[in-house]
Image (tube, rainbow, N blue to C red):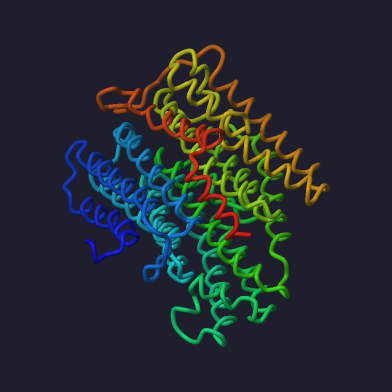
Amino acid sequence: MSGFPLAWIVVFFPWAGALLLLLLRPRGRLPAWVNLGVSAASCGLALSLLALPQGVQGWTRTDSVNLPLVALAGIIGLATAAFSAATVEGERFDALRARAYHAAFQVFMGAQFLALLSDNLGVMWVAIEIATLASVLMVAVHGTPAAIEAAWKFFLLCGVGIALALFGTILLYLAAQPLVGHGDPGLSWAALRAVAAHCDAGILSLAFIFIMVGYGTKAGLVPLHTWLPDAEAEGPLPISAVLSGLLLNASLLAILRAKAIVDLNPGVLAPGPLLVGFGLASLLLASLALWRRRDARRFFAWSSIEHMGLATLAFGLGAPLAGMLHLMGHSLVKSAVFFGVGAAAQIKGSQKMEAIKGLATSHPVLGWGLALGIAGLAGMPPFALFVSEFRLVAAAAAGQPWLLLPLGLGLLLAGTALVRALQRMCLGPASPDAPVPGAFGLPGGLAWASVPMWTLLALAAVLGFAIPAGLEALLMDAARLLG
């Protein structure tokens, strides 16, 4: 083990867990416990990367950009596995579907770690595609017509996106080839940054456009965003957390890696306005769409589109610290909210917002946790999104004052829609319970399912107002690298 880089162990350990879960004969809750154990070990390995020197090991690189996101992925993966263990019996999987679901989850986690840790843009592309395919399987695992339709839409739209991203990656390689030669160096992020200033500006500009549109599809950015609400509404309850909290981050990171290369060439088409355009379109469309949603999981999927738009806008405005903080805060709070909505859906027997009312009255631990999470998504303190949105507005005021009107309008519309949802779902008289058979079968029942939600909310509050010095230094350095 001493001769094998820890970064590769972080990648391969979940895949070994996936193989074990495929071979394991499903008996009762055993697959859920094994899934939880593998996720706990993966989280420990991911966090331990923070204590090691940064550097390159083959196709992987650890730096201040990806280390916070890798740690975040480990934490959310563990929280999702814990929530899944508490609620999976309510999904009513047969033995084959239970095996496929748990194995696909670990395949996704390994691919997520590889996408974040990769220094090679080609390997990153492959990793994001593996994560997408595993996600498609998880979305389709119920086998209902709605789940199959959502999975096909996910597969087809993201297939178009990944093809465009591949073409953009090839163009980056061709732009650098005269300077770095053939082979792996032409796809290394570090090597590309070293020669970017001397590459053909036209090819670099075209490459970034394709990468922006391609990976932007997987990041849930308008206009190729329509797979996201369906996928998050129809898949198993825990999957919404990893789609919003992890897959979108990896896709946006691929865009940011490309932007950090292209920015170094003074002759390229400036990537900032392109990011601002996609981010603003996503924010405004999602803020309007939130007012027409009746399904709770679809509602919060549209909130994911809004927040990815805000993060993209921050990076486009040259406020990478706000962007990184927003990505991390959104992942924590949105995952917590999806856990709350998932638990409520199993209690009420429906994920329609009309069926989920008065949770704070009938189930205080769950209801107040969900209320705090929704308030956090609306940008209220004490959560990280309050700080990141404040920094974003300040950056817009300093650099592009004309953005204050559409940005403020989007934030106001989205925030008001979220507060309205908070009032409908969490406050007032409670709607009757109609529990899904098998829900909360573990000892502790609903309390067990609520622990991951409250844990992630606590971390989001710490990230907002009591960020550890070491993490703050990492994020500051990440902002420097991303420009």
Name the side, left or right, on which 403 lies relative to 128.
Answer: right
Residue for point 56% across, 61% down = 215
Q: As rendered, which of 132 and 74 lies closer to the eye?
A: 74
Q: Could you tell me residue 371's position as x and y percent?
A: 53, 24
The residue shown at (54%, 77%) is 170
Outermost residue, right direction? Answer: 402
Q: Quadrant of the N terminus?
A: bottom left
Q: Quadrant of residue 82?
A: top left
Residue 108, percent from left and from top: 37, 54
Q: Residue at x 19, y 36 (%)?
A: 28
Q: Is residue 462 above or below residue 444?
A: below
State whether residue 314 is above or below residue 4. Answer: above
In the image, taking residue 296 as reference, residue 363 lies left or right, namely left
Name the one closer to the observer, 399 or 350.
399
Q: Is residue 173 above or below residue 250?
A: below
Residue 137: image x %, image y %? Answer: 38, 53
Give residue 284's quadrant in the image.
top right
List x then y, in percent, for residue 247: 47, 52
Q: Quadrant of the C terminus?
A: bottom right
User: Which residue corresponds to the image point at 22% horizontal and 43% vertical from the top-left?
Assistant: 34
Q: Is residue 386 left or right of residue 59?
A: right
Q: How many marks?
A: 0
